[in-house]
Amino acid sequence: MKIMAGNSNLPLARAISAYLEMPLTDASVRRFADEEVFVEIHENVRGEDVFVVQSTSYPANDNLMELLICIDALRRASAKRITAVVPYFGYARQDRKPGPRTPISAKLVANLITQAGADRVLAVDLHAGQIQGFFDIPTDNLFAAPVMAADIQTRYGTQELMVVSPDVGGVVRARSLAKRLNNAPLAIVDKRRDRPGQSEVMNIIGDVKGRMCILIDDIIDSGGTLCNAAQALMDAGAAGVSAYITHGVLSGGAVARVSNSALKELVISDTIMPTEATASSDRIRVLTIAPLIGEAVRRIADESSVSSLFD
Ligand code: R5P
């Protein structure tokens, strides 16, 4: 087997290859003067089981093109099986038509990856589980929850915990984390806008008074959802609020918003390479999921069970 990397998250790709104790495939993924992507693989991959690590994070379109072109290069070099390892699958939030004459871009991206020549996909915490079904090739969806649960136990294990979903859509994810935390109780932030034009009211379902609240979500983008939820929880009497989020998209002024929020700490995984602002923030901590992805890659290569990683 071989591990190849695009440029979107080289530190993660290197950490995965270190876990697997094998070097990254010698390849260059670079730009021509006009910014077209060019890929050249400098070693034989004929008949190999190749895993290409590339998150389609910002800049999403460039990183997606790199992934597609890497897959094309591998296919034309006669790799036996190509797995697109996409720790952060961008465009995932466009998974349905929000209105007439709008696209379902997550499905389009799934089609592109398949058509480029991928035989399998490995992703982490897909925004919606059903995105797995957008691919007509085997797709493994890993969960960061075990890594997060272990960290929560270490940091907050002695406190009265409450797992909180920042919106109604995230309840299944929150419940699954709560189960891993000795069945910690669950609360939900329910955003309501009674009339159009009125500002949103945050109702907390569950009694968070005196509890250390752990907000859980798949994505932090602008930070609005999380920071507002954290404030609402503090207003409802929470002892403290920390957030565990798989994908730190952190666009625009999100890092500053987090720094000025009621959040004690934001913990993200390294599915997206942290920017300098993220890495230097004393309010944000990054947990690596390289061993989890590395182990899943090893099991796929060995044809052994991936789901048992989460038992
Ligand atoms: C939404 O469905 C996602 O799970 C996140 O809650 C959302 O993308 C977060 O976005 P933002 O940080 O911009 O509020």
Image (cartoon, helix red, strand yellow):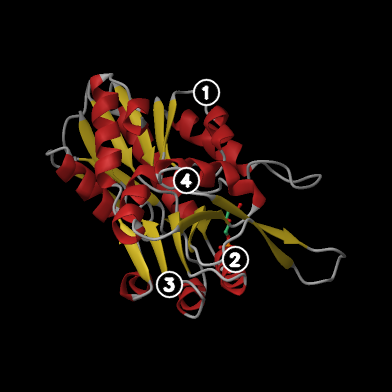
- Residue at 38% in and 73% down: 283
User: Gap between marks 3 and 2, in whole Å?
Assistant: 13 Å
Question: Circle 2: is it few (<14), some (14-19), or many (20+) Cα within 10 Å?
Answer: many
User: Gap between marks 2 and 1, in whole Å?
Assistant: 37 Å
Q: Position of residue 234 (x, y in %)?
A: 56, 72
- Quadrant containing ligand 1 reads bottom right
Q: Along the horizontal axis of the image, is 47 left or right of 242?
A: left
Q: Are marks 1 and 4 in contact (CB under 8 Å)?
A: no
Q: As displayed, is residue 122 above or below residue 305?
A: below
The amino acid on which the numbered mark 3 sits, given as a three-letter code, is Lys
- Residue at 55% in and 50% down: 186
Q: Which mark is residue 264?
A: 3
For residue 141, say whether it is visible: yes
Q: As displayed, is residue 249 above or below residue 258?
A: above
The amino acid on which the numbered mark 2 sits, given as a three-letter code, is Ala
Ligand 1 closer than 8 Å to label 2 CB: no
Question: Circle 4: is it few (<14), some (14-19), or many (20+) Cα within 10 Å?
Answer: many
Q: As displayed, is residue 136 above or below residue 21?
A: above
Q: Considering the image in quadrants, where does the N terminus appear?
A: top left
Q: Are marks 3 and 1 in contact (CB under 8 Å)?
A: no
Q: Nearer the viewer, mark 3 or mark 1?
A: 3
Residue position for label 1: 136
Give SS at disc 1.
Answer: loop
Q: Which mark is residue 178?
A: 4
